[in-house]
Image: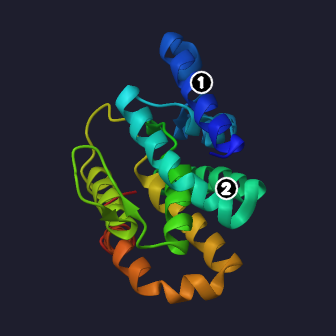
Amino acid sequence: MSTVLIIVIAATAIISFVAWRDQQIFEKYKFNVGAIMRNREYIRLLSAGFLHADTMHLFFNMLTLYFFGPIVVHAFGTVGFLVVYIGSILLGNVFSLYLYKNQSWYSAIGASGGVSGILFASIAMIPDLPLYLLFIPIPIPGYIFGFGYFAYSVYMMLNPRQHDNIGHAAHLGGAFFGLVYAVGLRPVIATENMLYLGIMALPLLYMAYMVFVKKRIG
């Protein structure tokens, strides 16, 4: 297990727990369109990635990072891992800011953008990586897991629930960053895996259609 991965998971968990105990910290550093646009509190674009709604939200994000993070570290090194993770959080939240720029009340939290970037970058390298998930006794190929992960994220984003506070829109921006990074640095491997990546990206294509063609959100 990479040291940098342990540090990121530990830091995210600690910051999330601290924010749960101090609502002022939570409100100050969560992603909020109004605060960013009006007050130029750009730190929220990054800090929101270290806050979570509850223990289950934190657990599943960090579990995904735990499974896929080592692949990115092995393929791109410690610096590459940090570039993908932090860059994906930032781009994911920038995309959310663009998407909801006219909704000053919109808020969100979570490492979803960063995790999505790690997920796409790692599966781009090993798309058929077998994963054993809780309560499922058979291995699931990585690209199938990725498909399900994004299908859920797209559904939740297009069908928002009150007080959800999860940045589902950030998944797309983060995934895009991770995928582009992997393809840019390992174009031969990524090209060989385009079929798997295409299957995994189907929910994202549907999301792009709903957002940019049907104007469902924004």
Q: Nearer the viewer, residue 61 or 67?
A: 67
Residue at 53 percent across and 25 percent down: it is 16
- The structure residue drawn at horizontal position 33% and vertical position 35%, both measured from the top left corner, is 164
Badge 1 crowding class, 10 Å Cα cut-off, few under 14, some 14 to 19, many 20 or more, is: some
Give the colour scheme shown.
Answer: rainbow
**Residue sitting farthest toward the front:** 137
Relative to residue 175, is residue 204 drawn left or right? left
Give the residue at mark 1.
15
Is 182 left or right of 119, judged from the image as shown? right
Q: Which mark is residue 87?
A: 2
Specify the quadrant of the image occupied by residue 125.
bottom right
Three-letter residue code for mark 2: Gly
Disc 2 secondary structure class: helix
Is residue 9 found left or right of 140 in the rendered image?
Answer: right
The quadrant where residue 208 appears: bottom left
**Which secondary structure lies at badge 1?**
helix
Answer with left or right where residue 104 lies relative to residue 43.
left
Residue 102 drawn at (x, y percent): 47, 49
